[in-house]
Image (cartoon, rainbow, N blue to C red):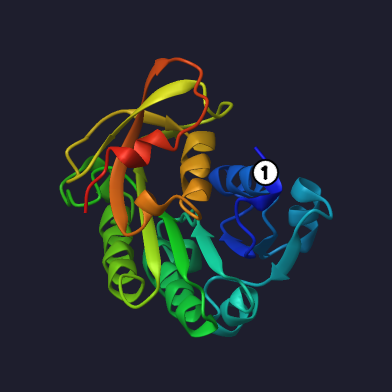
Amino acid sequence: MDTGSVYKGKVLVAGATGRTGSWVVRRLLHYGVPVRVLSRSEEKARELFGDRVEVAVGKIQDKEDVARAVEGCQAVISALGSSALSGDSSPAEVDRDGAIRLMDEAVKAGATHFAMVSSIAVTKWFHPLNLFGGVLTMKLAAEEHLRKVFGQDDRSYTIIRPGGLKDGEPLQHRLQVDQGDRIWNGWTNRSDVAELAVLSLWVAKARRRTFEVVSDAPEPQQSLEGCYDKLHD
């Protein structure tokens, strides 16, 4: 494959210095896709990615920072995740308000695709994960906003709902995908979540799709594109 030709637009990655977001950046670079990252710390971003990416220094809580970061980008991949129960790193501030702010500024900037990492059980308010600042409820609110603003005109979205996140190399497991939030348990490698998000940039069947994904038996994969063949509108 000529990996330099799969996608020509510039992609903003939010949450890029987190464990899932850093995999998103690595998989974008693997395919030769131009990358800009939004990070509070340029130093941390450079430690992770060197000079291979553009760095937009700023916070997801600041509208002007977000607007500057997304300017000139054709797509956005959000791997945002809260890190505290309260304050400006809480689920309400990051998983809901920060993500929605990013979506709205991406629309204003003319971005045409937005991929979001969400979670399984996101519609289950009584799930134990929701004890952590209502994180599932916050992610669901962001999902609903994304479907509204990127589900019209020439824009598209992909919402990936992984199981519990683990570390490991990509394309080493079969993946189980489903829709309708019927998968309650399971785990997923962060690297495979990143791969699915990156593939959504150019795989037509990924457009305007929301789905759950968990890892199945170990088995090396040539590609994860086939996961999108199993989805429906």
Q: Residues within 10 Å of mark 1 (few under 14, many from 20)?
A: few
Position of residue 6 relative to residue 192, above or below, is below
Judged from this view, the residue extending furthest toward the right is 51
Position of residue 64 relative to residue 144, above or below, is below
Asked if residue 79 lies left or right of residue 142, the reply is: right
Question: What residue is rendered at 26% in x and 49% in y?
Answer: 130
Asked if residue 168 lies left or right of residue 227, the reply is: right
Asked if residue 232 lies left or right of residue 170, the reply is: left
Question: What residue is rendered at 61% in x and 62% in y?
Answer: 11
Task: Give x and y (percent) for residue 66.
Answer: 57, 76
Judged from this view, the residue extending furthest toward the top is 218
Identify the secondary structure beneath mark 1: helix
Task: Give x and y (percent) for residue 93.
Answer: 42, 69
Quadrant where the C terminus sits is bottom left
The amino acid marked with disc number 1 is Thr
Nearer to me, 218 or 223: 223
Question: What residue is rendered at 62% in x and 65% in y?
Answer: 9
Quadrant housing residue 41: bottom right
Task: Give x and y (percent) for residue 114.
Answer: 45, 64
Residue 118 in sight:
no
Task: Give x and y (percent) for residue 149.
Answer: 33, 76
Quadrant housing residue 181: top left
Position of residue 59 relative to residue 83, above or below, is below
Question: What residue is rendered at 56% in x and 57% in y?
Answer: 15
Number of labels in the image equals 1
Quadrant where the N terminus sits is top right
Q: Which residue is mark 1?
A: 3
Nearer to me, 137 or 31: 31
